[in-house]
Amino acid sequence: MAAAAAPRGRQRGEPRALGRAVRLLQRLEERCGDPRLSSSPPSLRDLLPRTAQLLRDVAQTRRTAGGGDPEGPGGAGDFLVVYLANLEAKSRQVAELLPPRGRRSANDELFREGSRLSHMHAELGALFPQGKYCGHTYQLTKAPAHAFWRERCGARCVLPWAEFESILCTCHPVESGATALALRSTIDLTCSGHVSVFEFDIFTRLFQPWPTLLKNWQLLAVNHPGYMAFLTYDEVGARLQACRDKPGSYIFRPSCTRLGQWAIGYVSTDGSILQTIPPNQPLFQALLEGQKEGFYLYPDGKNHNPDLTELRQMEPQQHIHVSEEQLRLYWAMDSTFELCKICAESNKDVKIEPCGHLLCSRCLAAWQHSDSQTCPFCRSEIKGREAVSIHQFQGRPVEARLPAEDPRPGSDQEDREEPQGQVAPSAPPLPPRLNLSPRRPRDEGQRKVKLLKGKSPLQLPLCVP
């Protein structure tokens, strides 16, 4: 009886807690008069009203549903209890750090707390889009990470850190002591003492690939002098000012605006300080490529640049197996499965995550250079990419005919990773064939390509990384 009464009591208290959080954010917003608080992302003056509105949406949806969201352990109710308590604590910390009325000064600690509030807004938006709970169906970007979470955590969207650490150790052993504390500070973005499926998704995207997840984290975050946590765009520029006479100096940080991606700041040959967000690829690849081109040579201005080549040697490549049934469809259309369906020249060698569509890396690079962050086939958000190698059924039948109900020539029915021997049930729309050309071709012999003239359905704002 007492156990049954606890959820009912929590549900009665939840609307009050949501309303209290909204009022607290509104009071904070009224005090955010410092122009510095809106100078670069994450902007408190923009963040606070958006978080308050999302909380109103959650309250309205929960009230309408009458508590119909999944309420098992680690479900919507448990998440909101943890989230609202943490939000109240963080909001009070920010209130203490805000300058008194009439003064327009702000310290660096305030901006760090602002970064945590930004992470909390992103987390709430990911698990409650438009206020509706989806934590039990949240799709992690990296397939092995998704399988790990769902197999070991089930439908839960949040776990206490101690429980999560013990579960993680079954796959990726963690040393106790300082290493475990450092790992917790990296994964627990919101500093709640818990780990959500969203936070784990961000961590596994930052420190991919999965088989060497903690090895990557140790080399790139724990031991690398160029790693900076919770720095903003302006703070990166300020830190690199001391290295302007040393081109090739660089530091890197998790992006504040594109969670799960890295932002790299570096000093160019003319002494300018530039910042870039590399495409969705493992960070060590971007650093090794930049080192080869002379951009990333001195981490935080130091002469020793850690050797990351061992991570490249350990990087796995996914193999896509193509069945005879799948190949017959392409042979009947005088095509092949491995041929990229955008340029129709290069072979597919990359998989978009999490949707799973396949294309060649050159077409993907050109597509993303057009500032599009959505899949060219299904328009879902591109959160990552993975190198693939296609192994097809050997041999070609003497005669291959197109069945009456086969897809039309030019469709992309097989361009997603599917279990061997199965055919995708429906085809996403195929964009017009592109003459793709990169912005800066490496040599005159490369074919040139042309980007789509039509706009992508999702237009992302051009914001500071």
Image: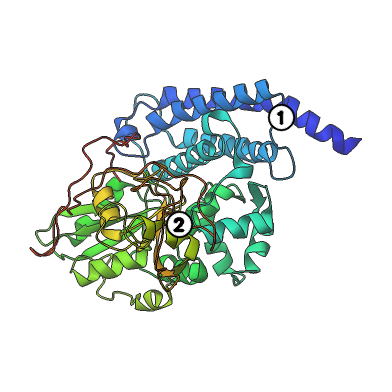
Quarter holding residue 312: bottom left
- Taking 125 as reference, is 457 left or right? left
Question: x%, y% of residue 319?
Answer: 45, 69
285 above or below 61? below
Question: Circle 1 is placed at which residue position?
Answer: 68
Task: Tell me the CA gap for discs 1 and 2.
Answer: 32 Å
Question: Circle 2 is placed at which residue position?
Answer: 205
Question: x%, y% of residue 139?
Answer: 54, 48
Kind of residue at disc 1: Gly
Where is the N terminus found, in terms of image quarters? top right
Q: Mark 2 packing: few (<14 Cα in 10 Å), some, or many (20+)? A: many
Q: Could one spot residue 188 in this view of the protein?
A: no
Kind of residue at disc 2: Arg
Residue in front for this viewpoint, 421 or 275? 421
35 above or below 261? above
Instruction: Give the total number of marks visible in the rendering.
Output: 2
State the residue at coordinates (70%, 37%): 70
Residue in front for this viewpoint, 383 or 262? 383
Q: Mark 1 packing: few (<14 Cα in 10 Å), some, or many (20+)? A: few
State the residue at coordinates (86%, 38%): 3
Check contact, mark 1 vs mark 2: CB within 8 A. Answer: no
Q: Residue furthest front?
A: 399
Question: x%, y% of residue 40?
Answer: 30, 39
State the residue at coordinates (45%, 28%): 50
State the residue at coordinates (20%, 52%): 436
Q: Secondary structure at mark 2?
A: helix
Q: Could one spot residue 417 in this view of the protein?
A: yes
Q: In the rendered structure, which disc, 1 or 2, sits on the residue that comes first in sequence?
A: 1
Question: x%, y% of residue 101?
Answer: 39, 24
Q: Secondary structure at mark 1?
A: loop
Quarter holding residue 177: bottom right
